[in-house]
Image (spheres, rainbow, N blue to C red):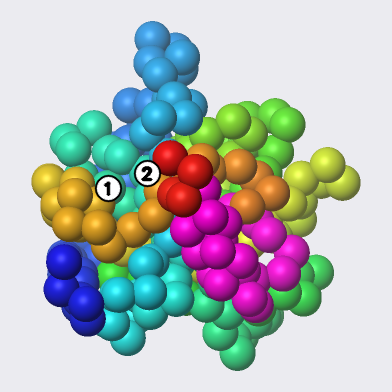
Amino acid sequence: MNPSRRLTSTVISPQTLVSLLAWCCFAWNAPALAADAADPAETLVLVARPSVSDPLYVQAILLARQLPGGQHVGFILNKPTELTLTDAFPGQEASKSVTEPIYLGGPAVLNTVFAVVHSPTTPVDGTLALTGNLYLAISETAVDDAMTAAPRERARFYLGAVLWQLGELDAQIDQGDWYILKATPELVLSTHTAGLWADLVRQAQLAATWI
């Protein structure tokens, strides 16, 4: 394995990505597919190995969700920005209730804000089931609703996303770029992201010594 590996990110138009995700919202919210929508095997947490040198993914933790065509969409979980929701949505009263910064989700569609929501109930239309009680808010309405989360809900907001074309993420995993972890609400929406990458790498390396 190359000791200093750079990853490439697929670049697509904002319309293509948003249209693809919107189609997934429609298809996976259909009753016939509801049982498959939250299949945990299709949602992963990726932890960049120390050998990864791409500036965007150095010490990065990502959430990745498989799409129907075999592509994957994801979000970087541990890169907070200096932007707030009030900066992104000036004049919108609901944005003032969120004090946490917006996170950098990835290099694609950097003009779009998404939200990952932990909710005991299925959110409004315009969301994509991830795993368990985690949902991705895609539409403007769903993102707006995430700003006023109910007492038992939690949301985090991301600017941009990562998109892997068919077979791209599988190839990166095969060549050893990522540690793979189960996606849980506690990990995906971890309260403390600073230092989390180092902790997860240590855990993964320790686990490997027992295999």
Q: Is residue 93 above or below residue 138?
A: below
Taking the image as shown, residue 135 lies to the left or right of residue 49, namely right
The residue under the point 15% across, 73% down is: 2
Which secondary structure class fits the magenta region best?
helix
Name the one closer to the observer, 131 or 150. Answer: 131
The residues bearing labels 1 and 2 have C-alpha atoms spaced at a distance of: 5 Å
Q: Are marks 1 and 2 in contact (CB under 8 Å)?
A: yes
**Which comes sooner in the sequence, label 1 or label 2?**
2
The residue under the point 74% across, 64% down is: 191
Q: Position of residue 5 (x, y in %)?
A: 20, 76
Instruction: Tell me, for residue 72, which label it has, or none.
Output: 1
Which residue lies under the disc numbered 2? 65
* Crowding near the residue tagged with mark 1, few <14, some 14–19, many ≥20 C-alpha atoms within 10 Å: many
Q: Position of residue 113 (x, y in %)?
A: 48, 67
The residue under the point 72% across, 69% down is: 192
Q: How many marks?
A: 2
Q: Amino acid at mark 1?
A: His
